[in-house]
Image (cartoon, rainbow, N blue to C red):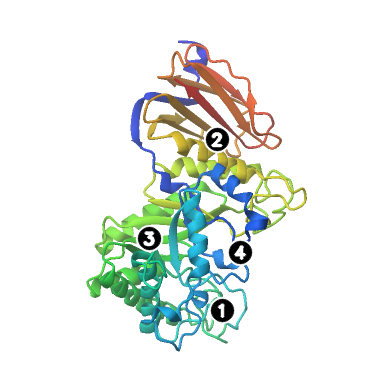
């Protein structure tokens, strides 16, 4: 053993398999766009990032005028009969789902509406006036895709996951009283009333959908965060009705990776206390928020901007840790290809750092079947090792998120005699560009190009 191996900060043992790689933890809300003449080329970038599932929330927003996904587009006239397929408009949503299938994305369908930033006046985001009728509308949507109901050719699109609403705990944009006061007003916020109504709605929709479609996965409610004061009442109401949701879902925005994983630990504890062991947990919106705040300097270059190197390395840290977490699915959030939530810098038109982070993990997902043992002695550095099912390829992803080291000693086992070893770096100035790497006596050193965050993807051809 050399001194380098003995002093390794990162270790990886490719002879020791610890778990199966789980593709659904590399999912997103990005999907092919309706405007094909303008966006068809973007499909290739989506393929490079290789997301597994795509969640439909906000797809109605980014495809302006397309009448897709959101309930007010699919069933626009609530006074009509939801038992008649002619009262629905499915064509645009069908088209967009087929675009997703064509590039290998699996749909995760959010039942409800996209976010509505209209202040105290609400339209689609208003609390439904008739819960029973909305449940029937949702059943009609599920029936269309699972059974070809209302499709001229009877085409079936077997969507497995169905989510009830989005962010009902949010502020004046998703589950709102029309003309009501701000629900975050500490004096008169009506939050308890809103929550009670949503619990009633959730249980009613869950019961209706599971009665006709027992084999689908139904859950939600895509909370803004893992708010137990919303989830416990939902679980208790389900228990009272003899119901069991298939999954719970929520969101997490921030810059501390630990926070996301503390949430799922708390959720598991809560579910055990409420008698719901074994539920799936889904984090279906997550993204880095820079220390300066939401959207600050999102579209230009600086290490801690919303889509620059700190964000990218946060993303790779999270993606690595998700694989061995209690989460069952995870969705990187974006609602446009450009701008704050996109993959291009608005000022230069160049692909941003989060694109390259997702591309790197998409490559790992493409060829990985097994997770291998790895560890880091530095909390700022995350190691993630995988190998292919045939044992002919192995990956080691080393991510430094806001760390202080310039050199990272690495020790590897089980890749001796590799036919080739390549390394690429994602840094403030480099976009997955090759770097020299000398492997000697089972060890090597990764040298950061600058003092900012950085990530290295090492590929072993065996």
Q: Is residue 377 visible in this depiction of the protein?
A: no
Q: Residue furthest left?
A: 242
Mark pair 2, 4: CA separation: 32 Å
Q: According to the image, label 2 marks what residue? A: 399
Residue 185's mark? 1
Between circles 2 and 4, the one closer to the viewer is 4
371 and 55: which one is in front? 55
Mark pair 3, 1: CA separation: 35 Å
Which residue: 57% across, 80% down? 182
Q: Give the image location of residue 165, x and y in percent.
A: 44, 70
351 and 378: which one is in front? 351
Q: Give the image location of residue 194, x and y in percent.
A: 45, 80
Residue 62's mark? 4
SS class, disc 4: helix
Which residue: 46% across, 39% down? 365
SS class, disc 1: loop
Q: Residues within 10 Å of mark 2 (few under 14, many from 20)?
A: many
């Amino acid at each position: 053993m050399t001194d380098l191996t003995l002093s390794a900060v990162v270790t990886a043992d490719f002879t020791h398999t610890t778990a199966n790689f789980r593709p659904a933890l590399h999912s997103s809300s990005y999907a092919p766009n309706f405007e094909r003449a303008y966006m068809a080329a973007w499909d290739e970038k989506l393929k490079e990032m290789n997301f597994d599932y795509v969640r439909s929330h906000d797809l109605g927003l980014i495809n302006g005028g397309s009448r897709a996904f959101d309930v007010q587009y699919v069933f626009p006239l609530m006074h009509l009969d939801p038992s008649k397929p002619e009262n629905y408009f499915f064509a645009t949503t069908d088209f967009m789902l087929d675009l997703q299938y064509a590039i290998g994305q699996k749909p995760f369908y959010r039942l409800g509406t996209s976010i509505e930033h209209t202040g105290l006046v609400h339209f689609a985001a208003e609390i439904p006036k008739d819960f029973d009728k909305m449940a029937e509308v949702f059943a009609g949507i599920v029936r269309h895709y699972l059974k070809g109901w209302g499709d001229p050719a009877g085409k079936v699109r077997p969507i497995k996951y169905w989510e009830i609403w989005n962010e009902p705990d949010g502020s004046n944009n998703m589950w709102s009283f029309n003309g009501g006061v701000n629900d975050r007003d500490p004096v008169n916020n009506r939050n308890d009333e809103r929550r009670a109504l949503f619990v009633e709605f959730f249980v009613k929709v869950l019961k209706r959908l599971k009665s006709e479609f027992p084999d689908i996965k139904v859950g939600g409610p895509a909370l803004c965060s893992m708010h137990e004061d919303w989830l416990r009442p939902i679980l208790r109401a389900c228990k009272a009705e003899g119901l069991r949701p298939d999954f719970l879902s929520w969101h997490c925005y921030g810059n501390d990776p630990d926070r996301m994983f503390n949430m799922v630990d708390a959720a598991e504890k809560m579910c055990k206390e409420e008698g719901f062991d074994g539920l799936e947990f889904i984090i279906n919106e997550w993204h880095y928020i820079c220390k300066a705040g939401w959207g600050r300097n999102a579209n230009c270059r600086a290490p801690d901007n919303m889509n620059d190197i700190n964000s990218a390395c946060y993303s790779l840290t999270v993606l690595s840790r998700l694989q061995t977490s209690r989460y069952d699915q995870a969705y990187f959030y974006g609602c446009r290809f450009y701008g704050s939530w996109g993959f291009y810098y608005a000022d230069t038109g160049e692909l941003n750092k989060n694109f390259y982070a997702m591309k790197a993990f998409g490559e790992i997902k493409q060829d990985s079947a097994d997770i291998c043992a790895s560890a880091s002695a530095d909390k700022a550095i995350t190691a993630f090792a995988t190998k292919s099912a045939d044992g002919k390829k192995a990956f080691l992803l080393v991510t430094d998120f806001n760390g202080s080291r310039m050199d990272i000693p690495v020790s590897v086992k089980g890749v001796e005699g590799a036919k080739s070893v390549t390394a690429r770096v994602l840094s403030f100035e480099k976009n997955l560009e090759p770097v020299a790497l000398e492997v000697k006596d089972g060890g090597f050193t990764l040298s950061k190009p600058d003092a900012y965050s950085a990530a290295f993807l090492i590929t072993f051809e065996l």
